[in-house]
Image (cartoon, rainbow, N blue to C red):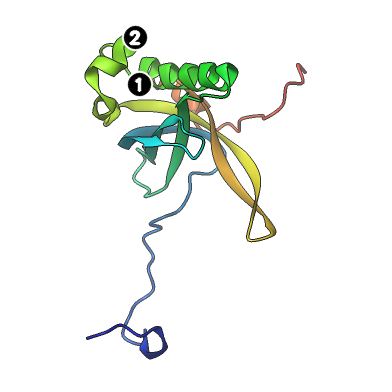
Amino acid sequence: MAFSFSDLNLKAIELSTSGTGATIPPGRHLVKVTNAELKDTRAGGKMVVVRLSELNGTERSIRHWINVHVPSSKEATRIGREQLKSLLVHGGHDDPDNIGQHGVGSIKDLEVGVYVVKDSYSQDGMEREGSKVRGYYNPNESKDTQTKPVLDDDVPF
């Protein structure tokens, strides 16, 4: 039977209350890498895409696109590799210096602290607010810092 959107009826469907698909808000969060994949970029490079899911029982998650090879920019490649190494070191990877030998799958199930900041972006011609990964930290840092907001500026006071 062919699907027709015009015939779609949701009368017998209940509202979802699980929070599935909710994005992790700005702040410090303890997360687990629930997926990690190596993907091609549009510019002919490579990136590692990780999905980070909160450990506190919510179903919130966030994706982080980490460039590991940007043919047109040594600086972007360096920054991406620094981000990946930070994830690996703070997540307790057994051999963070030699991730290539272990494969991208070895990133999955690492538990790490993540700094998430507010992000503004355009989609469909409209300005939207969201969240993005700013960095990683050792999850064994003091628990009382987990709910403090992350300041997203370089002002030293």
Q: Earlier in the sequence, mark 1 or mark 2?
A: 1
Secondary structure beneath dot 2 equals helix
Q: Work out whether residue 3 or residue 107 is closer to the camera in this orientation and state it.
A: 3
Q: Residue at x 72, y 26 (%)?
A: 153
- Judge from the rendering whether residue 130 lies leftward or rightward of residue 98; answer left or right: right
| Number of numbered discs | 2
- Image coordinates of residue 11 in percent, x first then y, are 36, 87
**Which quadrant does the N terminus fall into?**
bottom left
Q: Residue 94 appears in which quarter of the rendering?
A: top left
Q: Residue 38 appears in which quarter of the rendering?
A: top left
Q: For the residue marked with disc 2, what is the amino acid? A: Asp
Q: Which mark is residue 107?
A: none
- Judge from the rendering whether residue 73 lies leftward or rightward of residue 140; answer left or right: right
Q: For the residue marked with disc 1, what is the amino acid? A: Gly
Q: Work out whether residue 48 or residue 27 is closer to the camera in this orientation and state it.
A: 48
Q: Which residue is mark 1?
A: 91
Q: Residue at x 44, y 17 (%)?
A: 86
30 is higher (above) or lower (below) than 7: above
- Image coordinates of residue 50 in percent, x first then y, are 38, 35
Q: Are marks 1 and 2 in contact (CB under 8 Å)?
A: no
- Image coordinates of residue 119 in percent, x first then y, are 63, 42
Q: Residue at x 33, y 13 (%)?
A: 96
126 is higher (above) or lower (below) than 58: below
Q: CA distance from mark 1 to mark 2?
A: 13 Å
- Image coordinates of residue 72 in percent, x first then y, are 57, 24
Q: Residue at x 37, y 68 (%)?
A: 16
Q: Which residue is mark 2?
A: 97
Observer-side mark, 1 or 2, equals: 2
